[in-house]
Amino acid sequence: MLQREEQESHSIQVRDLTKKFGDFTAVDNISFSIKRGEIFAFLGPNGAGKTTTIKMLTTLLHPTSGTMLVNGYDPMKDQDAVRRSFGIVFQDQSLDEELTAYENMEFHGVLYRVPDRILRKRIEELLNFVELWDRKNDLVKHFSGGMKRRLEIARGLLHTPQVLFLDEPTIGLDPQTRNHIWKYLKDLNRTEGITVFFTTHYMDEAERVADRVAIIDQGRIVAEGSPEELKKKTDAKSLEEAFLSLTGKKIREEEAGSIDQMRMTRRMWGR
């Protein structure tokens, strides 16, 4: 049982969380907590269980066993409350490219029932924040990859979430755009105290921006701590060296269970 004091001081709490797809165990009895206002990196090789964990925390998958709390709510029992309390930027782009930047934001605000008296002001603030206000009336299909990512981040923040989930938010972006995006997120974390939970394969950005890191491999958390603590633990000069020391240097393919996982997820949602 999670203590009330811990619930109030932590944005995310996970205890003995497991997810199985048939005989394949994607997430294997993991536990971790994230304090309010932390920037937390969840790292691992391909097929390690990162995205499955995010899907459980964000109500998209039911766990096989274990407990979770997101902002004090159970993702399985209080789905609406959990969804209102977080924003998410998926690994794959999810904008409507036939709408303008403003229309994408407005549609999201309507879905989350942001009051009209607040919505317009909030859209203007966030589009200015990600430097897209001057492109608000442009169709998204004409945006660069970096512009789309910045718009997705602004959209994810529109309903003032307490936690922002980012699943490889800078994948495929040039170093300048990556640096700009992390500047926005660090400024937001500092000024509004939002908790950031992100995955990435760029170890340099995790080392640079994360307060704490958890490394998951083959469904289990193999290490957790600050980047400096993990480097010290493995006698490594960089987080990338520490990561390789903990997970090995063998190239990972998507694990055999990933295909079954995808099929079962689609069946769950009737797709």
Image (cartoon, helix red, strand yellow):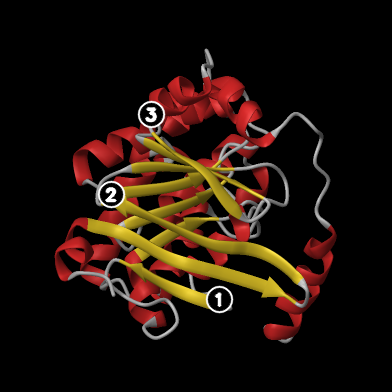
CB contact under 8 Å: marks 3 and 2: no
The image quarter in which residue 114 lies: bottom left
Q: SS of the residue at dot 2?
A: loop
Q: Position of residue 108 (x, y in %)?
A: 45, 67
Percent x, y for residue 1? 29, 75
What residue is rendered at 56% in x and 66% in y? Answer: 55
Q: Secondary structure at mark 3?
A: helix
The first of marks 3 and 2 along the sequence is 3
Tag on residue 63? 1
Q: How far apart are the two marked residues, 3 and 1, measured between alpha carbons?
A: 34 Å
- Residue 183 — which label? 3
Residue at position x 65%, y 60% from top?
98
Is residue 271 visible to the viewer in this orientation of the structure? no
Question: 10 Å neighbourhood of mark 3: few (<14), some, or many (≥20)?
Answer: some
Is residue 107 placed above or below 97 in the rendered structure? below
N-terminal-most mark, 2 or 1: 1
- Mark 3 and mark 2: span between their CA atoms? 14 Å
- Residue 240 is tagged as none
Few, some or many C-alpha atoms within 10 Å of disc 2 (few <14, some 14-19, many ≥20)? many
Q: Which residue is mark 2?
A: 194
Q: Amino acid at mark 1?
A: Pro
Q: Is residue 139 above or below residue 266?
A: above
